[in-house]
Image (cartoon, helix red, strand yellow):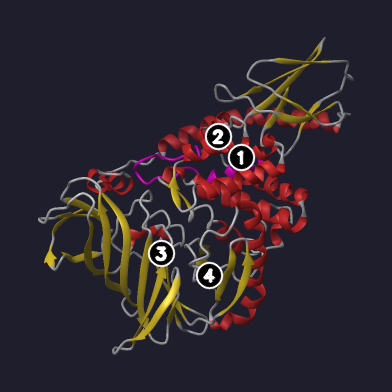
Amino acid sequence: MRSPVRALHLFALGATSLLGAFTATAKTAAAQRAPRFVRADSLRGTNTAERRWWDAKFYDLHVRVNPTDSTISGYNGISYKVLTPSNVMQIDLQQPMIVDSLMQNKTRVEFRRDTNTIFATFTTPQKVGDLNTVTVYYHGRPAAAKNPPWDGGFIWRKDKSGNLFVSTANEGIGASLWWPLKDYSADEVDSQRVAISVPAPMVNVSNGRLRSTKKEADGYTTFEYFAAEPINAYGISVNAGTYAHFGETYKGEAGDLTMDFWPLAENLEAAKVQFAQAKPMMACFEKWFGPYPFYKDGYKLIEAPYLGMEHQTAVTYGNGYKNGYRGSDLSGTGHGLKWDFIIIHESAHEWFANSLTDEDAADMWIHESFANYSEGLYTECQEGKQAGAEYVIGTRKKVVNDEPIVGSFGVNKSGSGDMYYKGGNMLHTMRQIVNDDEKWRGVLRGLQAKFRHQTVSGAEVEAYMSEAAGVDLAPVFSQYLMTTRLPIFEYKRDARGFQYRWNNVVPGFSMPVKVVVDGAASVTIKPTGLWQTMAGQFKPDAAIVVDENYYVLTRRY
């Protein structure tokens, strides 16, 4: 009879053989479905010459929402600082939205459309150092989201009571789907006004703090919000419906934080129970990541007619007032049914996505890998370290390894969906490498402190984490982010004992790993791509078992 350990390693050997065939097939399939980029993609994702010369400082957005015919109209005042001499400005507004006019200093500005982009030509000098404003007036019927939030767009619905229920979700597709701006994530404004007009008796909830509510003569109500802290454009949202409201003040690391909750009136009692999870969430994430990044603008949790999204200071929620992900546990361990996935995951994005924002969609792993990893950290806060690890490890079954996590730069193209589960397990593996929980917590908190309210590249994140951890993590990042291969810990017996190495890895890959040898106490070894020897006398059926907290495969010769 085979020993369980031996059977496990035979299984792993077979699995890695299958992995090779699967990887080859996946690479062929990926090549066949590789996107063909067009001019619109480059205009959307590149820091063009018509973008580089100006720095967006403030957006003054005013939008009227008409649910009767699913149209909107309004204007955005774009305040910008001139960095270098130029007179042609790129402003993004996706079709079929229509620009009516552009104005600067009461003078019309000529413009032309190129795919989803408007090029404005100024006749007045744009002097370096000047702070100018151009206002874009527009209208149209924005694209309707069919599968929000993933495809993006406006969501026109009714609640169970038949009341109008309208929202936006535009991650990936971009804010320019419904309003004009520099739709380039590397340039965030320092602050923004969001004034949304909706038909009474609807209530609109948007980003930042409510400054005023004005009843218009035509039966509309304008809700003016102001985000006082730097904000990413895709986080700006409309959330209009028949809302109820309640809130509390959280005593946090940076003082008093207002936490406001906006469920539909028909779900008020359910929300009072479910949204109570926001407070322990805040305590856990402040412990691990540092102070909530937007004390000036507060924290809001708002019911929406779709699953949810990380709109800055206005997190949207549509998980049905159930624990788990739509009532299921993504880890298969049972731990994920003890908390509400949307409250935890989307709120984690306030740190990773909203405060620390990727400069290019190709590095969206900065958002999603850390948010996925936060789920395990929250489980740890609630149930202990072992439970948190079990949750993270349980999500590995969802990794596909079909294409790299890092996407294509300069064309607004993120990489594989593996940025969630594989990315989270990469970070969990790095925690084992650091092998000091307080130091690891310092890395995460330091990352937030260094890049607070900034846009950042993946390379900058990687360099900082290596420096703060005191470990060169570059080969580990390369392995998990840039390839579809999992490291294989290989070992074999010879007369001297065991030989071991890493295989299926990038050049220079050298990751320490905890192992149990022949059932003895755990030890840390440092394999490389070359065979090394572990001398000693071992039983004939002795094996090396890798700590499951490392996201690797094992193969015995």
Give the residue at x 62% y 32%. 470
Q: Using the numbered discs, state the Cα–Cα distance from disc 3 to disc 4 in whole angstroms.
A: 13 Å
- Residue indicated by mark 2: 477
Point out the tag, 2 or 1, that comes first from the N-terminus: 1
**Which of the pair 339/280 is nearer the observer?**
280
Q: Please provide the residue range marked out in magenta.
A: 403-428
Point out the tag, 1 or 4, that comes first from the N-terminus: 4
**Which of the pair 56/330 is nearer the observer?**
56
Crowding at dot 2, Cα within 10 Å, few <14 / some 14-19 / many 20+, comes out as some
Type of the residue with mark 3? Ile
Q: Using the numbered discs, state the Cα–Cα distance from disc 1 to disc 4 in whole angstroms.
A: 30 Å
Q: Is residue 400 left or right of residue 37?
A: right
Q: Using the numbered discs, state the Cα–Cα distance from disc 2 to disc 3 in whole angstroms.
A: 31 Å
Could you say which quadrant of the image residue 17 lies in? top right
Residue 304 coordinates in the image, percent (x, y): 50, 71
Q: Is residue 245 above or below residue 6?
A: below
Q: Is residue 167 left or right of residue 330?
A: left
**Image quadrant in which the C terminus is located:** top right
Q: Using the numbered discs, state the Cα–Cα distance from disc 1 to disc 3 in whole angstroms.
A: 30 Å
Q: Using the numbered discs, state the Cα–Cα distance from disc 2 to disc 1 in whole angstroms.
A: 8 Å
- Residue indicated by mark 3: 236
Q: Nearer the viewer, mark 1 or mark 4?
A: 4
Point out the tag, 1 or 3, that comes first from the N-terminus: 3
Q: State the SS at label 3.
A: loop
Give the residue at x 53% y 79%. 264
Question: Is residue 412 shown in magenta?
Answer: yes
Q: Nearer the viewer, mark 4 or mark 2?
A: 4
Q: Is residue 87 left or right of residue 64?
A: left
Point out the tag, 3 or 4, that comes first from the N-terminus: 3
- State the residue lying farthest toward the top: 495
